[in-house]
């Protein structure tokens, strides 16, 4: 069954530390995305990628980097974690018909920065 | 840029009540409109998709329609069940940048 798998499911990080969130998809989709979820804000796009070895900035990219080493894998990197980055992070994938196809989301990574 | 406004943050109903959730959107593109549902501990999943071609979508007893004139779209269900308790997002797609724009979400609680 096609799926998007995120790891870890939850993480506690120290302010100023480096955090890497990982995402793996078996959907054979070209597009992958990282969203952030905060109460009352819905989901907001951080970075996305439409091909391996290339990433694009979304709506709220500041403080985040992304890496797409292969079609299946997409990582979100917080070089210097801050308290304001405490949130739930979702990875998603979609096929080439961007914006018109449904997305497949992972189950999320709950990040707490202390 | 694209935007979606979801007015109802929380809705509480009893089983067999009628559900109606409303959103408005703004975009310069021909939109594709989605409703996603999120259950506790899970990621959002697609519930319905509505395009400018068909104006309406139906799935699992839910019906979504959109009104181009007022740039609004709606989700309704005639008779909700306790299992429908979840967060519902209205979502705008179809523009540049390969992204979906989410509304703030409506938390539906259905009491038995």
Image: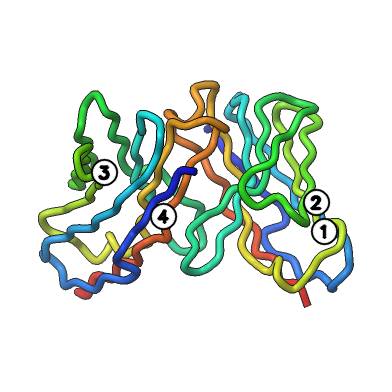
Q: Which residue is mark 3?
A: B71
Question: Are callouts 3 and 1 both on one chain?
Answer: no
Mark 4 or 2: in front is 4
Q: Which residue is mark 1?
A: A19
Location of residue A12 by image quarter: bottom right
Q: Position of residue A17 (x, y in %)?
A: 89, 66
Depth order, front residue of B110/B21: B21
**Earlier-in-chain disc, 3 versus 4:** 3
Q: Which residue is mark 2?
A: A77
Q: Position of residue B112 (x, y in %)?
A: 19, 74
Do the residues bearing badges 3 and 4 touch, measured as CB atoms within 8 Å? Answer: no
The alpha-carbon separation of the residues under discs 3 and 1 comes to 40 Å
The alpha-carbon separation of the residues under discs 3 and 4 comes to 14 Å
Question: Are callouts 1 and 4 both on one chain?
Answer: no
Q: Which residue is mark 4?
A: B103
Check disc 2 and report its element: helix, strand or loop.
strand
Number of other residues with Cα within 10 Å of mark 1, as a class: few under 14, some 14 to 19, many 20 or more: some
**Earlier-in-chain disc, 2 versus 1:** 1
């Amino acid at each position: 069954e096609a799926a998007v798998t995120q790891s870890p499911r939850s993480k506690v990080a120290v302010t100023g530390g480096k955090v890497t969130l990982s995402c793996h998809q078996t959907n054979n989709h070209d597009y992958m995305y990282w969203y952030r979820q905060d109460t009352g804000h819905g989901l907001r796009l951080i970075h996305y990628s439409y091909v391996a070895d290339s990433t694009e900035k979304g709506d709220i990219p500041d403080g985040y980097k992304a890496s797409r080493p292969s079609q299946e894998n997409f990582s979100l990197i917080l070089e210097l974690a801050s308290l304001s980055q405490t949130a739930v992070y979702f990875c998603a994938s979609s096929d080439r018909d961007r914006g018109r196809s449904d997305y497949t989301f992972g189950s999320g990574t709950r990040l707490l920065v202390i | 840029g694209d935007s979606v406004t979801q007015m109802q943050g929380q809705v509480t109903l009893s089983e067999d009540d009628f559900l109606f959730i409303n959103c408005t959107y703004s975009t310069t593109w021909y939109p594709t409109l989605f409703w996603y549902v999120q259950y506790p501990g899970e990621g959002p999943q697609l519930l319905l998709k509505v395009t400018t071609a068909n104006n309406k979508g139906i799935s699992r007893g839910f019906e979504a329609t959109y009104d181009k004139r007022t740039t609004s779209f709606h989700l309704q269900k005639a008779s909700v069940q306790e299992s429908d308790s979840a967060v519902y997002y209205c979502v705008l797609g179809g523009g540049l940048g390969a992204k979906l724009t989410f509304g703030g979400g409506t938390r539906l609680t259905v009491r038995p």
